[in-house]
Amino acid sequence: MTALPPDPDPAQTPGLEAGGGVAPGTTPPESAQTSGLSASEPNPRRRFTPTAIISLTALTLFVLLFVATGVLLLINM
């Protein structure tokens, strides 16, 4: 047996209008949702984490390559 999907089938849900909307004043059908984290994320030990350093390095390289390409295009004109 397969599990039922978390959202109701629109074809079998009463009160839905064409396109999936509900009439004014009616309550939409209940749907599965996620409300957020159950516990707060711990603060990093350092100001710059390894992921942040790698991201900033990659961004810097990209910007430098972009600027170098622009300079080369201007020189070759």
Image (cartoon, rainbow, N blue to C red):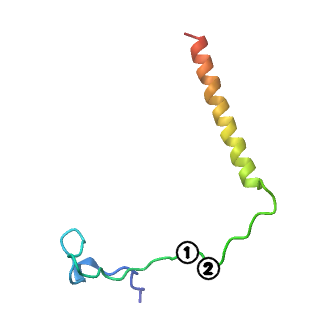
Question: Left of 5 or right of it: where is 43?
Answer: right
Residue lying at the far front in this picture: please name it: 25
The residue that appears at 62% across and 19% down in the rendered structure is 71
Q: Is the residue under label 2 in contact with that under label 1 (CB below 8 Å)?
A: yes
Residue displayed at 38% across by 80% down:
31
- Residue 63 in the image: x percent, y percent? 64, 33
Residue 69, placed above or below residue 61: above
| Number of callouts | 2
Residue 6 percent across, percent down from the top left: 40, 81
Q: Which residue is mark 2?
A: 38
User: Where residue 77 sits: x, y (%)?
Assistant: 54, 10
Q: Position of residue 46 (x, y in %)?
A: 81, 58
Q: Nearer the viewer, residue 4 or 66?
A: 66
Residue 14: name its quadrant: bottom left
Q: Amino acid at mark 1?
A: Gly
Q: In the rendered structure, find residue 36 and report the number of the disc placed on it.
A: 1
Q: Quadrant of residue 68?
A: top right
Amino acid beneath label 2: Ser
